[in-house]
Image: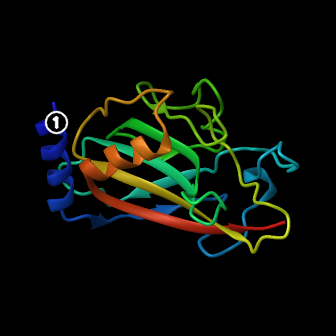
Amino acid sequence: MKKNWIALALLGMSMQIQAMDIVSADMQDGKALQQAQVFNSFGCNGDNLSPQIAWSKAPQGTKSFAITMYDPDAPTGSGWWHWTVVNIPARVNMLPAGAGQAGGANLPPGAVMGRTDFGAAAFGGACPPVGDQPHRYQLTVWALDTEQLPLNQDSSGALVGYMIRAHALGQASLTARYGR
């Protein structure tokens, strides 16, 4: 078992990650997040809707996609995972706004959301501490070399990130900001 994890890690490190294109009607690179993507708890009052996202220029050999939304500025020492989705079929190239609702009814069949740092397998919007400088929210789509990662709704953001990076062929990101 240990040899398989080592081989998997080495495989992921040796791949060249190709650039892809990403667009969102709800999230603009370098701009502020909208209230629709703000959490609705912990003192925040937003709609808690995952953003619409579309991508193109997936590398040859792409067998599935994954999506992550991560805040590297969270005062945790390890950032904050706001959304993870894996096992999105290769034929899919967009997700509508709200696809990250609990239960995954708006996700393509087979797609799986992992557990966010809010503790749920669902999108969790921005909610930085009051008075912090605006945090960065990195929305990334990943092209993967496998159809299915062995992850489920209990998989942590760190585990999802590890598995994604071990299988990544390409990626594209948008980074928006939000403060309160």
Residue 13: image x %, image y %?
Answer: 20, 59
Mark 1: secondary structure: helix
Check the image and report above or below for 12 versus 63: below
Q: Nearer the viewer, residue 89 or 135?
A: 135
Residue 93: give x, y in percent of width and height: 42, 47
Q: Is residue 113 left or right of residue 76?
A: left
Query: Residue at horizontal 75%, vertical 44%?
Result: 48
Q: Is residue 68 placed above or below 121 in the rendered structure?
A: below
Q: Is residue 6 left or right of residue 47?
A: left
- Judge by depth and name the residue closer to the eye, 85 or 70: 70
> Which colouring convention does the figure follow?
rainbow
Q: Quadrant of residue 20?
A: bottom left
Residue depicted at 85% across the width and 50% down the height:
44
Residue 97 visible in the current orientation: yes
Question: Which percent across, then down, holds residue 90?
Answer: 31, 41
Crowdedness near tag 1: few (<14), some (14–19) or many (≥20) residues, C-alpha within 10 Å:
few
Q: Which residue is mark 1?
A: 2
Q: Is residue 93 visible?
A: no
The amino acid at mark 1 is Lys
Q: Is residue 121 above or below residue 126?
A: above
Quadrant assignment, res 149: top left
Q: Is residue 6 left or right of residue 23?
A: left
